[in-house]
Image (cartoon, rainbow, N blue to C red):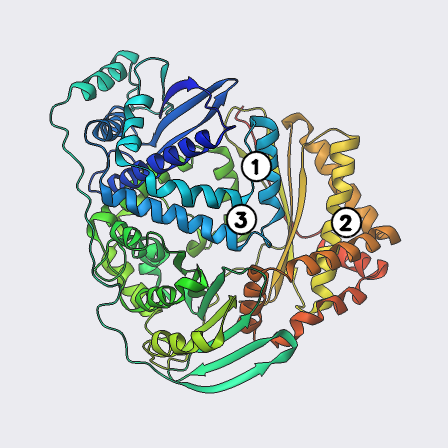
Amino acid sequence: MAVYHKHPAADQSTVGSYRRMLVERLFNDMINERLTEIAQKPDPPFLGAVSSRGRFVGSKDAYVLSALVGDGGIPKGLRALYTEGERVARFGFTATELERRKATAMRYFERALAEKETADSNSYAEEFTRAFLEGEPTPGIQYEYDLHKLFLPGVSLEEVNALAREWMTDRNRVVMASLPEKPGVAVPTEAELRKVLADVQTEMGIAAYKDTTTDAPLLATEPAAGEIVARREIPEVGVTEWTLSNGARVVLKPTKFKEDEILFQATSPGGISIAEDMNLVPANTADQVVPAGGLGVFSAVDLEKKLAGKAVNIRPSIDELEEGLSASASPKDAEILFQLVYMTFTEPRPDPVVFDVFKSQIKTYLENRTKSPETVFTDTLRTTLQRDQPRFRPMTVEEIPLLSLEKSLAFYRDRFADASDFTFVLVGNLDLASIEPLVKRYLASLPSLNRKETWKDWRVSPPEGVVKRTVEKGVEPKSMTAIVFSGPFKDDPGSRINIRAAGQILESRLRKLLREKLSGTYDVSVRPSYGRIPREEFRVSIDLGTDPGRMDEMTKAIFSEIKKMQKKGPTGPEVDEIRLAESRSYETDSRQNGWWLQELSDSYWLGEDPAAIVKYLDSLKLLTRDSVKAAAKLYFNTKRYVQVTLYPEK
């Protein structure tokens, strides 16, 4: 559901228009904060909502208020959405809201300026595209930073507040709503929606917004610091490793790839695999419902306000085989990052109100997800590969009563109760001398039980032989198929490089054949995956979308190309191209903090020597025509695969 207010396209060519854009961005950011807060209240009128302004079509801009609502909730959601806009029009924003958004905006440009020499090419490409298509100026980050520094202090509440009346007009206004065809769900009429908007404009009970803030510190009491009991250097990869007094391990790699970035990742074995069958639903949802409540004394909304102007974020996770967290921060905010890590372990904040909102959201999601043909297709593939193992089935509406905040919290606390088997990896602009006291205070002080545990393997091997399933869903004249080969895998450098090479060469050949020669598809992909935990096995998935009437033709062409590759192998130029591409990827990736974070985390997770990371190029010597030919025979076994195909309903 969305309300479009059409306006003439805004000029973007002057410094004055840039200042206006800055004011507009503050407006949208502040109203979006309010909409997010509403979505977390009891019985929310919408599941999520957004305020935005941008190019609509041709010479028109549009101010858009949009929301996602549950079945039958369009009138209620529209009323709440427009009421919030009307509240701003009547009473405006508060001074504290504006100051938070100013601080956040200034911090964003400070970071962008610090990273101007190491910014990704994609960001420039996107900016140049907008400049060409929409006439957006490209003054450069230094100039934009200077303009923000000049203009932000002078932006007043009055001029930001005035935008609500200017944008929310009753002329050139379009209300759009879409909903699934579903028995029992009423379709609102145009007259009903018009009345909602008219009623909001005359509603006398709309009150001014009250901004709740607190000066309380993140941590009421700082933890007693622990110690670093062992130190090790790994010079081949520039890594320092510390063992802490609580048993945790910290891996640090200082880099200069980005001036204003620290990346953080923690892992520990166990995850959802530890959960008993009866608690599987609370375990699967624990990393959603518990963090949604906030940390310590701060609700999620209050925590976001507290962190305004700080470049830091954190997300805990509990996956199939491990629990942990991912985080990032500016070096300037490193202590806040470590405080949040400590709180994520020790001070989760369960919130029954937010939990009820989550239940409502997931109910709406689950009621509608199986109406999507693609979802049914994906679910069928997943359950076929796992041979209907109950622990890997998608959640259903019937399981909603099994949701439990109490059980999710208990599982979350158990997974983060023992830091002794955690490995913390930090990569980025690290000054070890300043990081060391933070590690001692906030990581070495984490609780330790010295448990000796690991994950449990609940996976079931994919079926033997050839298994084919067909899904008939939807009316759109398109089909999809997934052909998945699987089997045991020897996890070593040679096997890894050769399965990837075989997949890339086959994908290139299939694109030329199916898309360019036969004109049978827009795209086809070949995706190999492999691992050692919980068992050494591989999968190669070939995914294709095509016209239903050509599916058999396309499938036969795929298997014909596989047989050619198995019989003759790749050409010399094909292998050379893969070797060159892999070499270039390594050179590019190894200058990224994110790549090092993942490589180091994987090395410690698998128990491998981190020094081997820089020996990757040596594995390219294991790539030959014969080795790829052998890989094609081994990994594209046409006597063992699962194929699931989607067709429209007859």
Q: Return the x and y of residue 634 as percentages of the image width and height.
A: 74, 59
Rendered image quadrant of residue 240: bottom right
Can the viewer see residue 634 in this picture? no
Residue 606, placed above or below residue 624: below
Badge 2 marks a residue whose secondary structure is helix
Task: Write down the residue under mark 1.
Answer: 138
Q: Return the x and y of residue 398 as percentages of the image width and height.
A: 31, 44
Q: Residue visible at 85% across and 58% down?
A: 625
Residue 384 circle label: 3
Q: Residue visible at 81% across and 56% down?
A: 629
Depth check: give the residue in front, 305 or 410: 305
Task: Write down the residue under mark 2.
Answer: 505
Q: Which three-letter amino acid code belongs to the residue tagged 2? A: Ile
Task: Assess disc 1: are there few (<14), some (14-19) or many (≥20) residues with their C-alpha within 10 Å of its C-alpha.
Answer: some
Q: Which three-letter amino acid code belongs to the residue tagged 1? A: Thr
**Mark in the foreground, 1 or 3:** 1
Residue 542, placed above or below residue 74: below
